[in-house]
Image (cartoon, grey):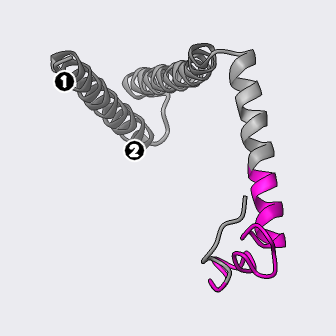
Amino acid sequence: MAVTGIGSLPGIGGIGGIGAGSVDGVGQAGSSLLDRINQIYQRQAADVGSTSADTRVSEAAAGRGADFARMIANGIGSLESLDRTAAERGVQAATGDLNDVHDYVIAATEMQTATEITTTLRNKALEAFNDIMRMPL
């Protein structure tokens, strides 16, 4: 089937023109591009047939969930480490074993800041969760 009236169009996006010297209205470069697009589409269609979309989505969500859980666990571990350090420095300052009192002040301030950030993140996460739960279906 021949397409008429397209033979005089200039090149589109550097493909080399539509209908330039071809019988069916699609140039050599355009034809190979269409073949390549068709191959990619066929491959994707075969992939969709082999695994359902729900399975792929749930696998991706599980991976992101594991990353998020690991990030939260690392953050809480860091918070606990800061708490231990501040407590140790406090005991050392109280017993006179700490040479520089400013080490305790720095550790206590780091702990306070980390606790405030953690609390703020928790509150924002709960707020976002509640907003999602209030969304109409």
Quadrant occupied by the C terminus:
top left
Residue at position x 39%, y 38% from top? 110
Q: Residues within 10 Å of mark 1 (few under 14, many from 20)?
A: few
What whole-number distance in Å separates the C-alpha atoms at marks 1 and 2?
43 Å
Q: What amino acid is found at the position of numbered circle 1 in the picture?
A: Asp
Among numbered discs 1 and 2, the one appearing first in the sequence: 2
Side of 6 relative to 120 (left or right): right
Q: Which residue is mark 1?
A: 131
Mark 1 or mark 2: which is in front? 1
Q: State the SS at label 2.
A: helix
Up-down: is 5 above or below 86?
Answer: below
Residue at position x 54%, y 26% from top? 71
Which quadrant of the view contains residue 116? top left
Q: What amino acid is found at the position of numbered circle 2 in the picture?
A: His
Q: Residues within 10 Å of mark 2 (few under 14, many from 20)?
A: few
Q: Nearer the viewer, residue 94 or 114?
A: 114
Report how many numbered discs are placed on residues in the image.
2
Which residues are the magenta region?
8-37
Q: Position of residue 53 (x, y in %)?
A: 59, 19
Q: Position of residue 48 (x, y in %)?
A: 68, 23
Q: Nearer the viewer, residue 74 or 82?
A: 74
Residue 16 shown in magenta: yes
Which quadrant of the view contains residue 32? bottom right
Up-down: is 118 above or below 20?
Answer: above
Side of 15 relative to 106 (left or right): right
Q: Which residue is mark 2?
A: 102
Q: Position of residue 38 (x, y in %)?
A: 75, 46
Q: State the SS at label 1.
A: helix
Which quadrant of the view contains residue 105? top left
Residue 26: assigned label: none
Q: Position of residue 27 (x, y in %)?
A: 78, 73
